[in-house]
Image: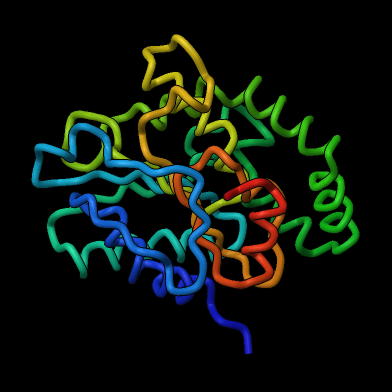
Amino acid sequence: MTIPRYLTAALWLLTAVAAFSPTTTTTRHPLHSVQSSSFKLASAAANEDVCTIQILMSDTGGGHRASANALRDAFDVLHPGKIQCDIVDIFTDYGPFWPFTDYPAIYKIMAEYSFLWDWFYHLGASPFGLAVNEFLMELFCFDSFQECLARPSGSTNHRADMVISVHPLCQDVPLKILSSLDTNGQTRAPSARTTPFVTVVTDLGGAHPTWFNKGVNKCFVPTDALYQCARDRNVQ
């Protein structure tokens, strides 16, 4: 029996909400929380009643949006009125041009033809494919994605206090953008980022390497197999 991804994401929130709430209390995920570094919410949440979270996803399959919605709903149930979530399909809404803006349609085509899916998946998972993907994404998407991450979140006039990714292609470039935003454009170095960033992996049996970036503050995974995948990618 396959467990719907959004149900898995909702279970993760039992612990994730405690970690992301306006307090500084953190607890370990009941399955696995792979933590790269400690963090606190951005400065705006420290002195305000409302914390804002931007959730990055893309409609390449139903699970990513469903997981984002489950996170938002769980936050609202456990901390009503305290956490505002801004769910963004970053490729459709902020992609610079085709094919970035048409990822959902391209995904559907590849899903219909398994040989295309296998070819792109394995090429993208190779060291060469990972390097090319990171280079092209930063080259073409950095500026437009920065508009997304810099926009006011919720009912506030400032950008999100924290960013959550529920998509495998929403780690590398957003992390660099946050470093740039946090330093007023001085650097994209991972060590300069102060805005918390969390990955919630929505796959179960296996996951593409792009899910795992050692620079994230927390990476939530649902299975032992994916915990090992994260460790293999140096997410500690």
Picture coordinates of residue 83, whole percent (x, y): 21, 53
Residue drawn at the location 86% of the way across and 45% of the way down: 123
Q: How many marks?
A: 0
Q: Nearer the viewer, residue 57 or 160?
A: 160
Q: Quadrant of residue 182?
A: top left
Give the residue at the far top of this rendering: 186
Q: Nearer the viewer, residue 61 or 38?
A: 38
Residue drawn at the location 82% of the way across and 38% of the way down: 129
Colour scheme: rainbow
Residue drawn at the location 43% of the way across and 42% of the way down: 197
- Decide: is 203 above or below 152: below
Q: Nearer the viewer, residue 186 or 86?
A: 186
- Decide: is 52 above or below 225: above
Left or right relative to 209: residue 193: left
Q: Nearer the viewer, residue 106 or 152?
A: 152
- Decide: is 208 above or below 36: below
Picture coordinates of residue 79, whole percent (x, y): 17, 63
- Decide: is 95 above or below 179: below
Give the residue at the far bottom of this rendering: 1
Picture coordinates of residue 122, whole percent (x, y): 85, 52
Residue drawn at the location 14% of the way across and 63% of the way down: 80
Quarter in which the N terminus is drawn: bottom right
